[in-house]
Image (spheres, rainbow, N blue to C red):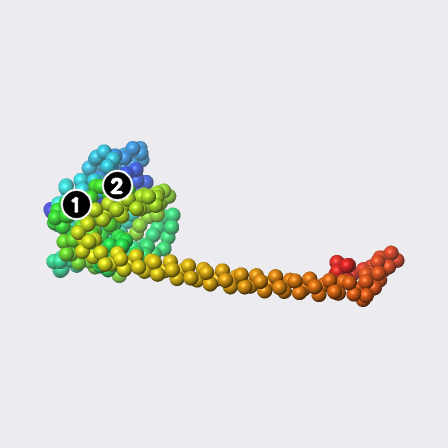
Amino acid sequence: MISQIPRVSVIMPCYNQGQYLDEAIESVLAQTDQDFEIIVIDDGSTEDRTLQALQKYERSSVKVLHTANRGPAAARNLGIQHAQGQYLLPLDADDRIASTFLEKTVPLLDRHPNLGIVYTQAELFGEQTGRFDLPPYSFPEILLGNMIFNTSLYRKMDWEKTGGYNENMVWGWEDYDFWLSILELGRDVVQIPEVLYSHREVPKSRSQQMTEADWVKSYGQIFHNHSTLYINHIQVLFEHLQTLRNDVHQTHHRLHTTQLALHATQLQLDSAQLRLNQVVDRVQNSKFWQARKFWFRLQKQLGRTVDLGDELLN
């Protein structure tokens, strides 16, 4: 990490994540491109382990800011207000980045003036492992759902132009909302096809605790925050709605067809069972069957062994 004005400011909100903080910070300190600063924002932590970890970093080159608990959006905005870097990289205190993250993302912003967001492919670790897949970025399809990871590199001047993270995103998705703000500036987006970001899956994360009502409120808030953007591209919403309606109609049609087939099959089974019962009745009432039953009873009375299978048929 250099002493002069850094190229990148890594913005790291932390709320009671002390057990993971070292790993997140170490992943930044291990960068092959050392032109950065780290700003940790204590978002009103109450856990002793976290407070002790933060106190340790206050004595290091890491900048630590303290605030009352107001959520990630407000914490990031506070950190960025104190940031010196030309570029910004949000990184949650329980996540990590590969050692070449800055080396491979920073030059893209340097070379392409209209590039607004650079992100990479990602993986999961912790409670769940494997690829962390989002749909490939495309516009205006991003209006239907987020396609960009929270840990992505962007320009501080764009944060200033947009007014920062919207703190009215109280249920989450403040990163999704912020990306839409950058897109409203007419910026381009690029994803590096390499896994350079690792997202930790933890029990009871914010995303896991969001209810269906929270989802609806969050989508509603995003629409209000970016109503012009949505209105200008309203066609994509109606196209998506029409696709959903077609899918529902086709599903209902397949379900109805399946129910008719099941009903026909049940009628065939009932008919076959009836015929089988009739055959059994005729056989059991035949003179041969009656004689057979008499023969087995006689065998048992005489103490002779009767085959179990034959006995069960009587």
Residue for badge 2? 170
Task: Identify which residue, 22 or 135, lies in the foreground.
Answer: 135
Q: Nearer the viewer, mark 1 or mark 2?
A: 2
Residue kind at label 1, given as amino acid type: Gly
Q: Name the residue rendered at 19%, 50% in the picture.
A: 227
The residue under the point 35% across, 61% down is 246
Q: Amino acid at mark 2?
A: Val
Q: Is residue 305 left or right of residue 188?
A: right
Return the residue nearer the eye: 105 or 75: 75
Percent x, y of residue 269 = 60, 63
Left or right, 83 with respect to 306, comes to: left
Q: State the CA–CA distance, disc 1 to disc 2.
A: 15 Å
| Residue 281 % position (x, y) | 73, 62
Mark closest to the chain's N terminus, 1 or 2 = 1
Quadrant containing the C terminus is: bottom right
> Which of these two is toward me, 72 or 209?
209
Q: Residue 164 is drawn in which quadrant? A: top left
Q: How many numbered tags mark residues here? A: 2
Q: Which residue is mark 1?
A: 164
| Mark 1 element type | loop
Q: Position of residue 275 (x, y in %)?
A: 66, 65
- Does residue 265 show up? yes
